[in-house]
Amino acid sequence: QVQLVESGGGLVQTGDSLRLSCAASGLTFTLYAMGWFRQAPGKEREFVAAISGSGRSTYYTDSVKGRFTISRDNAKNTVYLQMNSLKPEDTAVYYCAADRRAFGTRFQQDEYDFWGQGTQVTVSS
């Protein structure tokens, strides 16, 4: 049974940093590309970042480029999202997701096979 468990969310101030983690189990981690999505109150869930199975390819939505970094440690079956210079508009529940195609990076939600339960990030102004 595949499980994705996010952690690292919290309440921070504008300009602060947070690192989210997503621990995966029940799958061969290197065979999956991974993505981070977020859902703000009253809004649709949106793509944030993705990383290929090897970690060589990454892709970001424009609003987080230069501030967020996605990475993975395949020895620990974990994907990370380092978030710097946080803004109030980054407030959302953040979800990690696994795509059983290791190559490439995808931003469409329906291309992901497994999802975590989410972790709340709140950025105060």
Image (cartoon, helix red, strand yellow):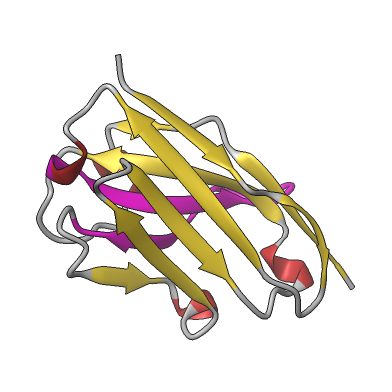
Q: Is residue 36 left or right of residue 119?
A: left
Q: Is residue 40 above or below residue 112?
A: below
Q: Quadrant of the N terminus?
A: top left
Farthest residue toward the right?
Answer: 125
- Residue 9, position as x, y percentages in the image: 68, 49
Residue 37 forms part of the magenta stretch: yes
Q: Position of residue 66 (x, y in %)?
A: 49, 86
Left/right placement of residue 83 relative to residue 104 reads right
Residue range corresponding to the magenta coloring: 31-52
Q: Residue at x 73, y 74 (%)?
A: 87
Counting from the top left corner in percent of width and height, residue 3 is at 39, 24
Between 60 and 46, the one nearer to me in the picture: 60
Residue at the extreme front of the image, as rendered: 75
* Residue beneath the point at 25% across and 46% down: 75
Q: Residue at x 31, y 53 (%)?
A: 73
Please provide percent x and percent y for residue 89: 72, 68
Taking depth in this image into account, of 62 and 81 the one nearest to the observer is 81
Q: Is residue 87 above or below residue 46?
A: below
Task: Assign the C terminus to one quadrant of the image.
Answer: bottom right
Q: Residue at x 70, y 74 (%)?
A: 86
Residue 82 vs residue 61, the one in the foreground: 82
Relative to 62, does residue 78 appear above or below in the rendering?
Answer: above
Residue 25: quadrant of the picture = top left
The stretch drawn in magenta includes residue 17: no
